[in-house]
Image (cartoon, rainbow, N blue to C red):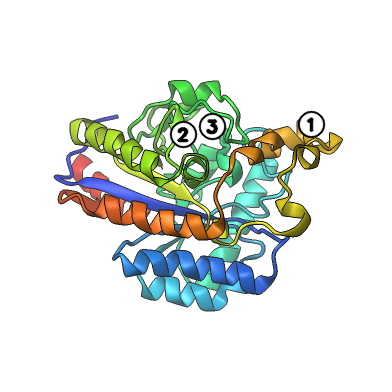
């Protein structure tokens, strides 16, 4: 692991496009279009990690993504409860990653180089398979994150993982080694620099959070990685949007299987803002980041190509 000088502070805006099967097709498409057009309007090339199995509904949107020079990455095969890469067998991981990669490449016409696992769960097995499949990067680690706004809860491996991009060890995903794939951690300082944090705190604290990450990046050369979900521009409705205590206390939400996949359901009570609020906050936060004269927005693979040039 080395300090990478890029002259400017790299900012990577990344979106996780989950299946969200509880929503009608038109709302899912609208959410993705809103996210990619928001970035395009601010001249931000972004990386969209797409869950493969339901991705055929986005055929038209994929054309726009490419025209706007965004990157399409892989976000797993089903994003189902079973797709937890910190627990799956090597055989099942290999099958899911192969299926997801081949299917997304077939329907997008793109060679995939960037991966992020569902619920950002990974393992040494995952990293080895991704490297074999030709991926250049994975962004499934959130170094020094310790919070309850996560399905990972307090991940002790995250607490000790390198903060800057690194090549993982063949037998340890959270330590620097020599696997031919870059692990690019999502930005965090106890709290993660992600949209869920903004749903809890609002936009003003997120700007101060960015200020801290910016100062770190200037000193260390670390990129700033932001994670969001397009579906947050729609929000939940009906029974899925209930926020009463009673709605969060159903017995199935406290089973080990549910908690491993989705975290503590009660965290939903922390989210205070509407989809309209969140859209405005996102526009404001991106504009604030872009106002710094020495930042540069990049897709994940553009960033990897830059740092590989620096390390040759």
Q: Which residue is mark 1?
A: 254
Compared with 234, 14 (above or below) is above
Residue 227 shown left or right of residue 99 in the figure: left
Q: Residue at x 53, y 79 (%)?
A: 60
Q: Secondary structure at mark 3?
A: helix
Label number found at residue 142: 2
| Nearer-the-camera pick, 187 or 105 | 187
- Whether the residues at callouts 2 and 1 have beta carbons within 8 Å, the answer is no
Label 3–label 2 contact, CB within 8 A: no
Say whether residue 37 is left or right of residue 256. Answer: left
Question: Where does the image place residue 10, in percent across and percent down from the top left?
Answer: 26, 47
Q: Residue 218's spot in the image, x, y percent? A: 19, 36
How far apart are the alpha carbons under marks 2 and 1? Answer: 24 Å
Query: Which circle's residue, 2 or 1, is located before the other in the chain?
Result: 2
Give the label, 1 or 3, closer to the camera. Answer: 1
Residue 250: x and y in percent read 83, 38
């Amino acid at each position: 692991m080395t300090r990478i000088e890029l002259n400017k502070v790299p900012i990577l805006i990344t979106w996780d496009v989950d299946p969200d099967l509880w929503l009608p097709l038109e709302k899912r498409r609208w959410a993705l279009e809103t996210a990619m057009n928001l970035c395009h309007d601010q001249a931000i090339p972004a990386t969209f990690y797409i869950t493969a199995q339901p991705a055929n509904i986005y055929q038209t949107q994929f054309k726009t993504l490419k025209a706007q020079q965004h990157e399409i990455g892989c976000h797993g095969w089903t994003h189902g409860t079973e797709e937890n890469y910190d627990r799956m067998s090597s055989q099942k991981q290999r099958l899911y990653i192969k299926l997801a990669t081949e299917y997304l490449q077939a329907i997008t016409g793109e060679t995939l180089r960037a991966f992020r696992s569902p619920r950002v769960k990974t393992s040494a097995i995952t990293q080895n398979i991704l490297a074999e499949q030709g991926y250049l990067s994975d962004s499934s680690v959130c170094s020094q994150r310790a919070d309850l706004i996560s399905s990972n809860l307090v991940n002790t491996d995250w607490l000790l993982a390198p903060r800057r991009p690194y090549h993982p060890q063949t037998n340890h995903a959270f330590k620097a080694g020599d696997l031919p794939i870059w692990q690019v951690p999502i930005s965090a300082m106890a709290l993660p620099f992600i949209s869920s944090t903004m749903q809890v705190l609002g936009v003003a604290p997120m700007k101060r959070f960015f200020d801290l990450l910016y100062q770190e990046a200037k000193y260390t050369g670390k990129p700033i990685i932001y994670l969001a979900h397009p579906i947050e521009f729609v929000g939940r409705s009906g029974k899925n949007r209930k926020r009463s205590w009673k709605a969060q206390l159903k017995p199935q939400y406290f089973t080990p299987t549910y908690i491993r996949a989705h975290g503590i359901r009660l965290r939903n009570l922390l989210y205070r803002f509407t989809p309209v609020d969140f859209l405005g906050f996102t526009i404001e936060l991106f504009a604030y980041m872009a106002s710094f004269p020495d930042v540069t927005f990049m897709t994940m693979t553009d960033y990897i190509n830059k740092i590989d040039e620096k390390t040759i």
